[in-house]
């Protein structure tokens, strides 16, 4: 089974991303969680993205709040699919992070989810959908999930 990486910009983002972990676990998708800020650890973040494919990751989930550049920074250094989760909690309630994540220039796409917990869960489901292309097991799980109402 392929594995995915979840990167968050700060330890303070971890509680919201529990929803993502819950759904990845439900689908049986192996993952690693890393705290790596595009602003506070820019070199480490870039290096993680550069080596992600050779380190066995199939997709990257990036969650950050405020001026959220984490997903874009990963997409700048990797050809893996990058799924962005804008987080709330700021003075602008996550709209700042939404715009920062979704408004990527031509050539450097980030698949952007909803703000906060719904986006965290959807990132996991979207990831399972990407991985299902080569996994009959995930195709079956996704079909069953839809049948039961698309939420845990
Ligand atoms: C972003 O700034 C993080 O992703 C977090 O959502 C926000 C605040 O970070 P902390 O000041 O709590 O570390 O980079």
Image (cartoon, grey):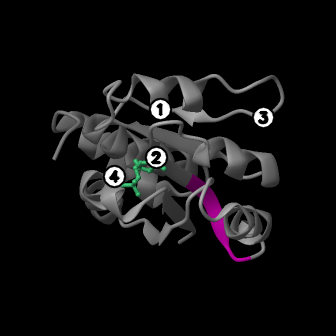
In this rendering, the answer to whether 37 lies above or below 130 is below
Q: Residues within 10 Å of mark 3 (few under 14, many from 20)?
A: some
**Marks 2 and 3: which is nearer the front?**
2
Q: Mark 3 points at which residue?
A: 108
Which of these two is toward me, 134 or 22?
Answer: 22
Q: Give how far across and how far down residue 105 sits, in percent.
A: 77, 24
**Dot 2: element:** strand
Residue pictured at 43% horizontal, 65% vertical: 29
Number of on-image labels: 4
- Of marks 1 and 2, which one's residue comes earlier in the chain? 2
Mark whose residue sits in front, 3 or 1: 1
Q: Is mark 3 on a helix, strand or loop?
A: loop
Asked whether the residues under the numbered discs 4 and 1 touch, taking CB atoms below 8 Å apart as contact, a structural biologist would say: no
Question: Is mark 3 in CB contact (under 8 Å) with mark 1?
Answer: no
Label 2–label 4 contact, CB within 8 A: no
**Quarter-wise, where is residue 65 in the image?**
top left
59 sits to left or right of 89: right
Report which residue position mark 1 lands on.
97
Q: Is mark 2 within 8 Å of ligand 1?
A: yes
The Cα atoms of the two marked residues, 3 and 1, are separated by: 17 Å
Which residue position holds label 2?
64
Q: Residues within 10 Å of mark 2 (few under 14, many from 20)?
A: many
Q: How crowded is mark 1: few (under 14 residues within 10 Å), some or many (20 or more)?
A: many
Residue occupying image coordinates x 53% and y 23%: 99
Q: How far apart are marks 2 and 4 (CA)?
A: 28 Å
Q: Name the residue under label 4.
A: 141
| Foreground tag (2 vs 4) | 2
The region drawn magenta spans 55-60
Q: Mark 1: is the Cβ under 8 angstroms from ligand 1? A: yes
User: Which sits in the foreground, 53 or 73?
Assistant: 73
């Amino acid at each position: 089974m392929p594995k995915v990486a979840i990167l968050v910009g700060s330890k303070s983002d971890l509680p919201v991303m529990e929803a993502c972990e819950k759904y990845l676990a439900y689908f049986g998708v192996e993952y690693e969680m890393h705290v790596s800020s595009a602003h506070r650890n820019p070199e480490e973040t870039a290096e993680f993205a550069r080596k992600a494919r050779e380190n066995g990751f199939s997709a990257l989930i990036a969650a950050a709040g405020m001026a959220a550049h984490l997903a874009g920074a990963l997409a700048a250094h990797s050809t893996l699919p990058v799924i962005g989760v804008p987080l709330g909690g700021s003075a602008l309630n996550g709209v700042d992070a939404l715009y920062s994540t979704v408004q990527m220039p031509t050539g450097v796409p980030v698949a952007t989810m909803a703000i906060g917990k719904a986006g965290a869960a959807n990132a996991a489901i979207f990831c399972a959908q990407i991985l299902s292309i080569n996994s009959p097991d995930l195709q079956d799980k996704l079909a069953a999930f839809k049948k039961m109402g698309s939420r845990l």
